[in-house]
Amino acid sequence: MSQTTSPSQDVQDMVAQADSGARNPKGIPGRILWFVPLCWSLFQLWYASPLPFIFNFGVLNDTEARSIHLMFAVFLAFTAYPALKHSPRDHIPVVDWILALAGSFSAAYIYLFYTELAERSGAPTTLDIVVAVTGMVLLLEATRRALGPPLMVVAAVFLLYTFGGPHMPDVIAHKGASLNKAMSHLWLTTEGVFGVALGVSTSFVFLFVLFGAMLERAGAGAYFIKVAFSLLGHMRGGPAKAAVVASGLSGLVSGSSIANVVTTGTFTIPLMKRVGFPGTKAGAVEVAASTNGQLTPPIMGAAAFLMVEYVGISYFEVITHAFLPATISYIALLYIVHLEAVKRNMPVLSDRAASMAGTVFGMLAFFGGFALTCYGVQYPIRWIAGTLDFPAPVLGGLTLLAYIVLLFVSAGQPDLETDDPNAREIEVPRVSDIYKSGLYFTLPIIVLVYFLMIEQKSPGLSAFWATMLLVVILLTQKPLKALIRNRNNVQEAIGDGVRDLFDGLAGGARNMIGIALATATAGVIVGTVTLTGVGQVMANLVEFLSGGNLILMLLMVGLLSLVLGMGLPTTANYIVVSSLMAGVVVQLGAESGFVVPLIAVHLFVFYFGIMADVTPPVGLASFAAAAVSGGDAIRTGLVAFFYSLRTVALPFVFIFNTDLLLIDVTWFEGILVFVTATIGILAFTAGTMGWFMTRSRLYESAALLLVAFALLRPDFFVARIQPPFDTMAPSALAGQVEQAQPGDTLRAYVSGPDFESGEQRSVLLSLEIPEGAAAADRMSGYGLEAAMDDQGRMVIEEPLFGAAFSELLQDFDFYGGDPVHLTSLEVPAEQPSDLVVFLPALVLLGLIMLLQQRRANQERPEA
């Protein structure tokens, strides 16, 4: 059976079930299922806007807003998602209406009785507990409907752990909690369901999901696909390359890999098959590209916003750290599909000359122009802001003027239509012919990126203003085009614009149901961690199983993420694993002598978490791609996992080489890291694919992997030439602290008895030298007091509460028989430049290229 240009009913049902609910009733229930999400979107826009403070009406605190947010999500979960596979989808049973109303009331309880609950904090009434228990049960059921059983089961296990602590094995036992205490903690405070994760969903994530849905409704998705196809479609393996770029562009504003697969895959997958990709590989390329869209700043699914709260750094810093790994990951995926096309000697879809230089220049011009625009607009904006007393109306007017000008340019081009990938002849458009047709779609993205990156406003406010511009675009693009083209269907176009706006608002809200429920249910797990202290239990368990080895510890964390990823959505997976393991890795890393930045651990967990939509047997993106390609879903998932090996390898690299996260690097160093890391990831790709200039021999693949390791982890080899630190006696601490330059980092190892077990333990302190002249002044900043005892040991006193190292040293027994003391001191050593590793690696890469090029010339048939 031939593929069609639109997804099959099975694929549509799969996307609906995963993203927006499979029910589509008629009549009044159908109108309710349209009106309630619309109200949800309008509420979120009101909450994000400055209007409540301007009019002093409808001002909500964070907790009240979270309550209303969850109220909408629970109501829609029971009305939009069938209870069972065979439950009715054309109408809503009475029992689901009852559950929806009961669940909504339970979720809204904090908002409705906020003042009363605050007055009796810690002393819940019987009604409070009944509502909490009812809400918890209905939340788990709503989560099962929207996201499947895995997250519900994991949350239920944690609840059982909360109540059954005293009856657990000794290694994981705790004192337990009563029903009143547990339900009050998890439902009536901000430590559980209504915690940080749901707060991020309320404040940030909803607006970005709404922004992506409205941008897609406006037609930007088709524009991105067309641009990508025009840039790359004429090359060998062009449809696959276009799929990667289009999915990356969609991933900039979308958090749904499944919808991304269907949106771009229904066009690109048939074209990939047409030029020679087997169905499973065509689907796998689309899956790998779509899921990796979640790696791409500035959106990154919901994880970027959660990292802001969990890591305690700004949003700008999060996306700065995430930028380089995401970029080289996509470059590697483009190279993967290029190698597949070359290996299979695939035909091209166009007789247009496929100039690599021209293609690269075109891509750089498109993306570089966008980036320069985002950066350059700050100068006229700041001039206007510094000149005028009330610049906002002028800036808003100039933005609308830019929109009208770009729309006028677009109206001079024919409207973009999705091509039939099964047509007898496929015409690859030229970028110069189509880029003007949708340039105005870049305006909301420019507004979003400008507020996020240049002004560094909050993500919620940035998304609000970008969404407001999208509201204008949806309402006016069709009527204005009709006027510009002198057509007589302006009235009809106005009606279409209003429908597009309301449908976009309603559709964006329905896409949020699963994310809101995932963050709320993950709050149960986070609340259990804070209530029971299971985090320390996990630390002890991981330390025991890994023997304190950081590599084994990271492997365990990655494996845990992958296992959970087989059933949990990416956001929930990230919340669960980071809550349980991020602090453990940092703590145990310090104890084993390695300082792991917290952001690196969170990105490590997130990278493994995105494999949730890939990993068989429940990778929904793989199933969606297989439904479009006609390939086997499990094989598609396995091939997609193979294509995503760089996504698995990169986290292990940037944990040890934090230069990849652009941590403490200069501009020059950042450019050097980008160039060498790109070459390294391409070498890794060639080594794992078994093809470079031609088919690689085993030793060539091994050499390519060695080159990749050297370029991505030069510190490993440099440390063998000269260790990064020289070891000194602990007694030299004061002198070294005084001699060091501000910004230098000393490392001190502390050993002493554990407060609980009395056994000796050690930890690494990283002493960043502050400003100040005297050692005593600098030492006081750390909260450390050290003195030599009669046995020649540098004994330290317990730091005061709140001091720099008080939390890290809190598990030591400072008042036992054995003192807590410094065992060694390490000062920075002069190391050779990374170039001593880069140059031999590049020479080896050049030799492999020469060998393969010579063999390729010999294998090439004579003309």
Image (cartoon, grey):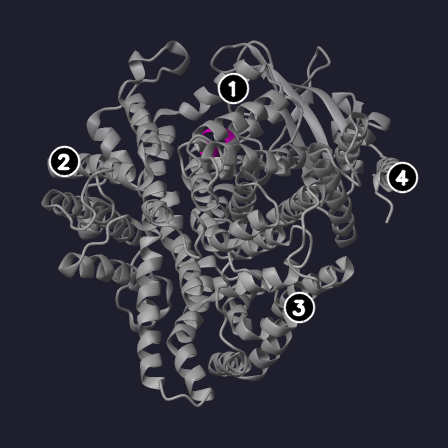
Q: Earlier in the sequence, mark 1 or mark 3?
A: 3
Disc 3 residue type (three-letter): Gly
Which one is closest to the eye, mark 1 or mark 4?
4
Residue at which label 2 appears: 130
State which tag comes first along the sequence, 4 or 3. 3
Query: Residue 589 falls in which quadrant of the image?
Result: top right
Check contact, mark 4 vs mark 3: CB within 8 A: no
Which residue was labeled with disc 4?
A: 854
Gap in angstroms between the C-alphas marked 2 and 4: 77 Å
Where is 500 relative to 354, above or below? below
Between residue 482 and residue 558, name the one nearer to us: 482
Q: Depth check: give the residue in front, 669 or 637.
A: 637
Answer left or right for 813 relative to 46. Answer: right
Indicate left or right for 483 with 736 as reference.
left
Query: From which residue to which does the magenta span run?
Result: 577-581
Q: Is mark 3 on a helix, strand or loop?
A: helix
Q: Mark 3 points at which residue?
A: 369
Q: Position of residue 535 (x, y in %)?
A: 44, 26
In this view, 228 is above or below 405: above
